[in-house]
């Protein structure tokens, strides 16, 4: 038996909408040229996100029937707590409705106005909650991460010198905000060697290390594949070694854990855990359900077990890689190395004639939808938002479109069709104009902003 194919077969299928170019043009105008504002009935292949879009297994669907919907003390909570303790190693587990619920509680609990929070590249919701709590996020990721052509195997690593400098000048650093597979850098992993060095620095400066564990299983796979000394360890062992270097984590279970909704906070310190539980009842729900149904917690527990199976995670990463390699071989500029959850298209190189103010990646995502009904996501200047101090656009070096692969949902043929469409769109690049923003909401503008196409 070979080891790169999917370790499952398909039991239930869901038809996908087939549309015409005219339908899609009308849909795009209605949606203000923002793929977040399309209805899913207008989308043929939905590669907007891998968040909550996973296919659950028969075991997970069966687990839903075991939901204990008691307001307090649901047995499903204790099953989830036990699973997180065993797999991730955090003693205290506080469920939340999804990842940003966990980020909200952790930010409010740990950050005081004026604090500095260093981390390996921003994530939209994570940074916003840090800012709303009065903190300032400082990016300390290695320089290589900002260069889409750099093939460093661990582009999620922290620049340790830069981190020490920030810790020296900042008044107060409540914690280091460390992401596993850095989403905005292209799904790039952090190495265990780097994480160990971060732990040592945090101890020296007396601060905490908080992990964004959302895609930590995918990160563990890259460590197994790339970091010397880890080839013979299981993904589960590596995941545990990563978590053991941290004081706590926030988790969006909607990614690695193969469910459609859910999240949790993991902590070691009992006092912090008591504070987090108390904030949980304010914002999420009682600390034994945190905004989730009992059945959701049961499905997460089963999903966690499935997520750390080496065959599952290998097939998952290989499917993403296959799409990336196909695009690369057809001459499409993408972020290298190919990341864990998505292939990222480099809109700067695809539309060199478009200034960043004309939102090249937003336009590219719209063009891909128009061509084939494939939905992708902008990850560039629109996603980066405005600097809260100056009110000006933040201008990230990376101007990308994320082609994100949900877990266990699409076949190789679907992704072949997507590749053909992306090649066609990039072939017409020189004739494509930019966009003008016509509506801009205050927070996380990329979700709801509207645009109008500009002529070339
Ligand atoms: C995604 F366009 N990610 O990648 P929640 N940390 C990390 C995430 O990737 C993440 C969260 C925390 C999403 C959904 C999404 O700008 C966007 O469960 C590394 O979504 O609350 C979520 O977890 C938050 C899409 C979020 C976005 C923010 O598609």
Image (tube, rainbow, N blue to C red):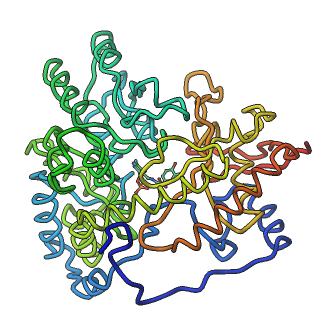
In the rendering, at what x and y percent does residue 375 appear? 64, 63
Quarter of the figure that contains the C terminus: top right
Vertical arrangement, residue 46 with respect to residue 168, above or below: below
What residue occupies the far right of the structure in this picture? Answer: 455
- Find residue 262 and report its image quarter: bottom left
Given residues 255 and 188, the one toward you in this image is: 188
Given residues 289 and 404, the one toward you in this image is: 404
Vertical arrangement, residue 394 with respect to residue 321, above or below: above
Q: Residue at left 28%, top 67%?
A: 311
Q: How many marks?
A: 0
- Find residue 28 and report its image quarter: bottom right
Q: Is residue 124 visible?
A: no
> For this view, does 435 lie left or right of residue 102?
right
In the rendering, at what x and y percent does residue 414 appear? 59, 72
Q: Residue at left 35%, top 56%?
A: 252
Given residues 415 and 433, the one toward you in this image is: 415
In the rendering, at what x and y percent does residue 416 appear? 61, 67
Q: Is residue 18 visible?
A: yes
> For this view, does 54 lie left or right of residue 280?
right
Q: Residue at left 9%, top 42%?
A: 269
């Amino acid at each position: 038996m070979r080891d790169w194919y999917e370790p499952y077969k398909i039991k239930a299928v869901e038809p996908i909408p087939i549309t015409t170019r005219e339908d899609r043009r009308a849909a795009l105008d209605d949606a203000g040229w923002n793929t977040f504002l399309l209805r899913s009935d207008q989308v043929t292949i939905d590669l907007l996100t891998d968040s909550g879009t996973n296919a659950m297994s028969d075991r997970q669907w069966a687990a839903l029937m075991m939901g204990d919907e008691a307001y307090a003390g649901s047995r499903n909570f204790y099953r989830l707590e036990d699973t997180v303790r065993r797999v991730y190693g955090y003693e205290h587990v506080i469920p939340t409705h999804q990842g940003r619920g966990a980020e909200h509680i952790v930010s409010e609990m740990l950050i005081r106005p004026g604090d500095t929070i260093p981390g390996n590249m921003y994530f939209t919701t994570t940074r916003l909650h840090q800012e709303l709590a009065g903190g300032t996020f400082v990016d300390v990721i290695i320089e290589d991460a900002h260069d889409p052509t750099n093939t460093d195997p661990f582009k999620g690593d922290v620049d340790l010198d830069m981190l020490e400098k920030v810790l020296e000048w900042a008044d107060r650093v409540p914690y280091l905000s460390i992401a596993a597979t850095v989403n905005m850098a292209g799904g790039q992993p952090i190495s265990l060697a780097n994480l160990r060095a971060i732990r040592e620095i945090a101890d020296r400066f007396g601060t905490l290390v908080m992990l964004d564990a959302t895609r930590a299983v995918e990160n563990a796979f890259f460590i197994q594949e790339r970091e010397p000394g880890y080839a013979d360890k299981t993904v589960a062992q590596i995941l545990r070694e990563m978590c053991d270097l941290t004081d706590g984590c926030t988790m969006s279970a909607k990614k690695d854990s193969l469910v459609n909704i859910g999240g949790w906070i993991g902590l070691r310190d009992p006092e912090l855990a008591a504070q987090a539980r108390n904030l949980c009842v304010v914002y999420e729900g009682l600390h034994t359900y945190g905004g989730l149904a009992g059945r959701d917690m049961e499905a997460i527990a089963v999903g966690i077990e499935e997520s750390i199976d080496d065959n599952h995670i290998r097939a998952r990463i290989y499917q993403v890689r296959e799409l990336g390699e196909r695009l690369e071989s057809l001459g499409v500029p993408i972020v290298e190395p190919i990341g864990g959850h998505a292939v990222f298209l480099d809109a700067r190189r695809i539309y060199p004639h478009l200034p960043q103010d004309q939102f090249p990646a937003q336009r590219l995502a719209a063009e891909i939808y128009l061509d084939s009904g494939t939905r992708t996501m902008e990850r560039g200047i629109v996603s980066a938002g405005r600097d809260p101090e100056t009110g000006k656009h933040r201008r990230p070096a990376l101007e990308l479109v994320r082609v994100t692969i949900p877990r266990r949902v699409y076949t190789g043929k679907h992704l072949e069709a997507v590749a053909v469409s992306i090649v066609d769109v990039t072939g017409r690049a020189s004739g494509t104009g930019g966009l003008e923003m016509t509506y801009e909401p205050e927070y996380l503008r990329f979700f709801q902003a509207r645009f109008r196409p500009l002529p070339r």
